[in-house]
Amino acid sequence: MSSANPGACGVKIRFHRELYAEDAIAAAAATFSDYAKFAVATDGEHFVVEVSDVDAEVEGDVVAEFCNFALANSAATGRRGDA
């Protein structure tokens, strides 16, 4: 996983497809959909997630927690991405 610096519109996160399952990333996005907007795309060996409109009222780091859920969901499924 790697991420770009957050800009005015949000942050872009790259998850390597050999380590993360697309359905696990989608499930994490659904979990946090009340707190931010998530757009998932595929770019070569990565799933790219653009996170925007993060709710400023939420305590904690929504992006970091989303990444934790994506990793935990991928580990729980025992599947890798469709690389």
Image (cartoon, helix red, strand yellow):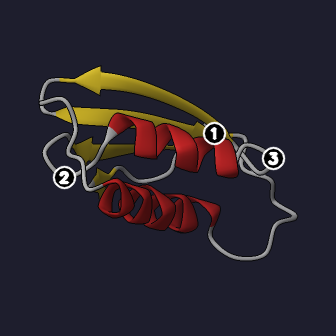
Which residue occupies the extreme right position in the image? 57
Residue 8 shows up from this direction = no
Q: Residue at x 54, y 58 (%)?
A: 66
User: What kind of residue is marked 2?
Assistant: Leu
**Mark 2 lies on residue:** 19
**Mark 1 lies on residue:** 52
Secondary structure under tag 2 reads loop
Comparing 26 with 2, the one in front is: 26
Disc 3 packing (10 Å; few <14; some 14–19; many ≥20):
few
Residue 40 shows up from this direction = yes
User: What kind of residue is marked 3?
Assistant: Asp
Q: Residue at x 36, y 35 (%)?
A: 22
Is 72 situated above or below 53?
below
Q: Is residue 35 left or right of residue 25?
A: right
Residue 12's quadrant in the figure?
top left
User: What kind of residue is marked 1?
Assistant: Ser
Q: Position of residue 46 (x, y in %)?
A: 21, 35
Which label lies toward us, 2 or 1? 2
